[in-house]
Image (cartoon, rainbow, N blue to C red):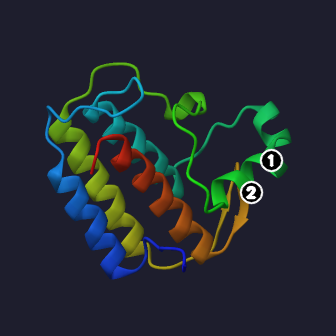
Amino acid sequence: MAKKNLYDADVYEEMLTRMSILTPGTQAVWGSMDVAQMLAHCSEVQDVYNGKPLDVPFWMLLARPIVRPMLLSEKPFPKNLQTIDQFQVVDPEDFDTQRERLINALRTMHAFGRRDLNHKLMGRMTEAEVGWVTYRHLDHHFRQFGV
């Protein structure tokens, strides 16, 4: 099975369609975030792939040889996986604001076009790796909310 790539137009449209199914009342299948917090979390992660600085704890940099293969794997992410502080969302968020923020972050990714990047946590990434891991992260959280 070929890995999906968020840079591909059909995959990009699939994710926008899945996001459009979400409502402020959509309940999580697992985890502690509500739907607006999930959108805020996904937006923050996407913003980092779009160039926002990432604050990575030193210990996490030491764990790169373990973290990178896990994130690029085809195995599903474990449920309730801990994330770094910058990506944690605990305060209430506005659903419409966060949905628009995520849509804009995805548009920005596409405006930049396919590109390799040097990610502070992941290290050097090819455009295929960027497209895969960004798809995979969104897919994980959309599944968390049943879409």
User: Do residues under tags 2 and 1 come within 8 Å of each other at their CB atoms?
Assistant: yes
Separation of disc 2 and disc 1 at Cα? Answer: 6 Å
Q: Secondary structure at mark 2?
A: helix
Disc 1 marks a residue whose amino acid type is Ile
Of all residues, the one furthest to the top in this rendering is 91
Q: Position of residue 113 (x, y in %)?
A: 44, 78
Left or right side of 80 for 145: left
* Camera-side residue of 115 and 16: 16
Left or right side of 51 for 97: left
- Relative to residue 48, is residue 129 depicted above or below? below
For the image shown, how many numbered marks are present on the structure?
2
Left or right side of 73 for 28: left
Q: Residue at x 20, y 30 (%)?
A: 94
Instruction: Read off the residue under disc 1.
Output: 66
Q: Residue at x 26, y 27 (%)?
A: 93
Instruction: Read off the residue under disc 2.
Output: 69
Disc 2 marks a residue whose amino acid type is Pro
Q: Residue at x 31, y 79 (%)?
A: 10
